[in-house]
Amino acid sequence: MCVASVARVAIRPRTYGGRTGEEEPRVQEPQDSEDGSERITVDAQGSVTVVRPYGEMDIVRAPAFRQALHDALTTEPRPTSVVVDLHHLAFCDSSGLNALLTARILAAEAGQDLRLAGPRRQFLRLLEMTGASDLFPIDQAPPF
């Protein structure tokens, strides 16, 4: 699996898979790819980085999600906060949750804030069923 590094830019969102978004600060839904890597965008805005997964997060797409989260947390200069915008995530299984739990540990070790934003009902139910609902700060509205 080829992994593209995350460029931390203020205006140009980065799409996993190596494609760059438009010059505007808004993020449009990327096209689907075989491994799901183009279904995750990373957008650095000052000391905050926003990771946006789109569509469904399952065992096929989870490795790209895990890598996007890792890169968002570790790319220099490191952000003080990483927000995972779940507004466009229609479905998430345990492999996607596992990627978030791994990122939570990485963020805690580095003294960074990892927040979830705009989760849908299915994702909130997943957190409740697994006992993970108290592990993440959750903002009901999507960021920016």
Image (tube, rainbow, N blue to C red):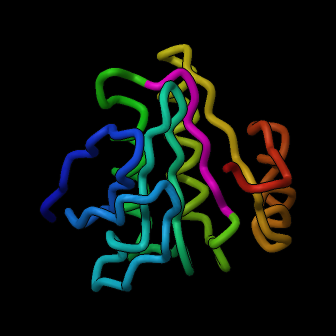
State the residue at coordinates (77%, 47%).
132
Q: Nearer the viewer, residue 3 or 18?
A: 18
Indicate the position of residue 59 as horizontal and vertical percent values. Answer: 45, 73
Q: Quadrant of residue 30?
A: bottom left
Indicate the position of residue 119 as horizontal and vertical percent values. Answer: 76, 61
> Left or right: 15 with respect to 120?
left
Quadrant (top left, top right, bottom left, bottom right) of the N terminus? bottom left
Question: Which segment is the magenta one?
Answer: 79-86
State the residue at coordinates (56%, 80%).
55
Task: Assess whether residue 28 is covered by the magenta stretch.
Answer: no
Above or below: residue 51 compared with residue 15: above
> Left or right: 86 with respect to 129?
left
Most frequent secondary structure within the magenta stretch: strand
Indicate the position of residue 64 as horizontal and vertical percent values. Answer: 35, 62
Q: Nearer the viewer, residue 80 or 12?
A: 12
Q: Quadrant of residue 38?
A: bottom left
Task: Assess whether residue 84 is covered by the magenta stretch.
Answer: yes
State the residue at coordinates (65%, 78%).
91
> Left or right: 94 with respect to 76?
right
Q: Nearer the viewer, residue 14 or 120?
A: 14
